[in-house]
Image (cartoon, rainbow, N blue to C red):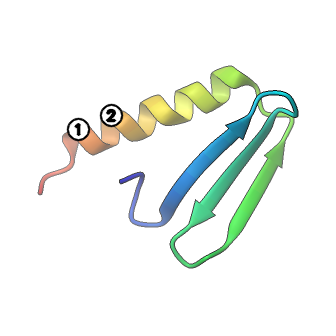
Amino acid sequence: MLSSNLSAVDYNPSTHTLIVWFQNGTVYEYYGVSQSVFDGLLLATSKADSTTDT
C-alpha cells in the first residue's frame, strides 16, 4: 500500500512523466520528473509501509 490516498504510481523514463493514481479515481501526471525523484518516491513509500502498524 502506497498510502491511504494513493492507489498506484508509474514512471515513463522516455518522457520523464510521473503518473499518480489516487483512491478516488483522480490521476495526476507530472512532467519533467527525473528517475531519481521517482526512485526516491518509491523508497519513501516503501519505508512508510515498513513502519506502519497493522
CA separation in Å, label 2 and label 1: 5 Å
Q: Secondary structure at mark 1?
A: helix
User: Going by the picture, which residue comes out furthest to the bottom?
Assistant: 24
Q: Seen in the image, is 44 located left or right of residue 51?
A: right
Residue displayed at 69% across by 38% down:
11
Location of residue 22 by image quarter: bottom right
Number of callouts: 2
Location of residue 38 with respect to 17 vertically, above or below: above
C-beta proximity under 8 Å, tags 2 and 1: yes
Q: Seen in the image, is 24 located left or right of residue 18?
A: left
Image quadrant containing the N terminus: bottom left
Q: Secondary structure at mark 2?
A: helix
Residue displayed at 82% across by 32% down:
16
The amino acid marked with disc number 1 is Ser
Residue 30 screen position, x and y as percent: 79, 48
Location of residue 18 with respect to 5 vertically, above or below: above
Residue displayed at 13% across by 52% down:
53
The amino acid marked with disc number 2 is Lys
Residue 21 screen position, x and y as percent: 61, 62
Q: Seen in the image, is 53 located left or right of residue 24?
A: left
The disc placed on residue 20 is none
Image quadrant containing the C terminus: bottom left
User: Going by the picture, which residue comes out furthest to the left?
Assistant: 54
Residue displayed at 76% across by 25% down:
34
Which residue is under mark 1? Answer: 50
Which residue is under mark 2? Answer: 47
User: Going by the picture, which residue comes out furthest to the top?
Assistant: 36
